[in-house]
Image: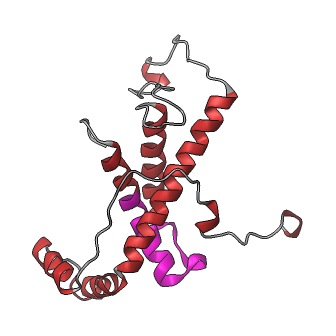
Amino acid sequence: LEAGLYSRQYLESQLAVALGGRLAEEIIFGEDNTTTGASNDFQQVANIAKRMIKEWGMSDTVGRVALETPQQGGPFMGRAMGQQRTRWGTKIMGKTDAEVERLVNNSYLKAKQIITENRPLLDHLAKTLVEQEVVSAEEFQMMLVEFNAKVADFDIIGDDLNRDSLPFQNMPAMSNI
């Protein structure tokens, strides 16, 4: 993210956007045939979700508190040397981890809903990109109209973790590994 002021709703929508590439792979090729192409997107999602909870106080569960200070250079640049780091208890840090998980899970489900509802548009866009490599903004706008693209109301993400709705639920037992 660039410097600026961002609403909670905007940041949550950015989480869903960043997960779109991986979701398109999952929907088209299946969960077992996804690639490593979305690794940078996952780093972006983790960074935004953690900062929302730990730096910007965007969690009703954790509260309006900054658990971390913004990173402004690594310890080798002398910034973190000699500074006392705030230590928070395991209870609040556990809540923080659960809140980050909730944000990511619900963003994943919202993005999946959007892509699934617009699958014909996705297929047409993919075919067009294979044929001509680039789609202009005007061409894309025309596709949105042609395929009657469905937009999602992006209210603030819900309170449930929604673990049961995520892929990769059938993991092998540890004894089989």
**Can you give x and y, in whole percent of width and height, for residue 147 in the image?**
23, 85
Image quadrant containing the N terminus: top left
**In which quarter of the view is residue 4 placed?**
top left
Task: Indicate whether 58 appears above or below 79.
Answer: below
Q: Is residue 89 left or right of residue 115?
A: right
Residue at image location 43% in from the left, 75% down from the top:
24
Q: Residue lying farthest right?
A: 175
Residue at image location 48% in from the left, 65% down from the top:
109
How many numbered dots are placed on residues in this image? 0
Residue nearest the viewer, comparing 119 with 82: 119
Task: Indicate whether 133 appears above or below 113.
Answer: below
Task: Indicate whether 66 appears above or below 153.
Answer: above
Residue at image location 26% in from the left, 82% down from the top:
129
Q: Main secondary structure of the magenta part?
A: helix
Q: Which residues are magenta?
A: 16-37
The colour scheme applied to this rendered structure is: secondary structure
Magenta segment: does it hold 24?
A: yes
**In which quarter of the view is residue 164 placed?**
bottom right
**Can you give x and y, in whole percent of width and height, for residue 13 in the image?**
35, 55
Q: Residue lying farthest left?
A: 138
Q: Is residue 68 left or right of residue 138?
A: right
Residue nearest the viewer, comparing 60 with 17: 60
Q: Is residue 58 left or right of residue 81?
A: left
**Can you give x and y, in whole percent of width and height, for residue 49 in the image?**
46, 45
Task: Indicate whether 3 appears above or below 106.
Answer: above
Image quadrant containing the C terminus: bottom right
Residue at image location 45% in from the left, 58% down from the top:
107
Magenta segment: does it hold 87?
A: no
**Can you give x and y, in whole percent of width and height, for residue 105 in the image?**
53, 57
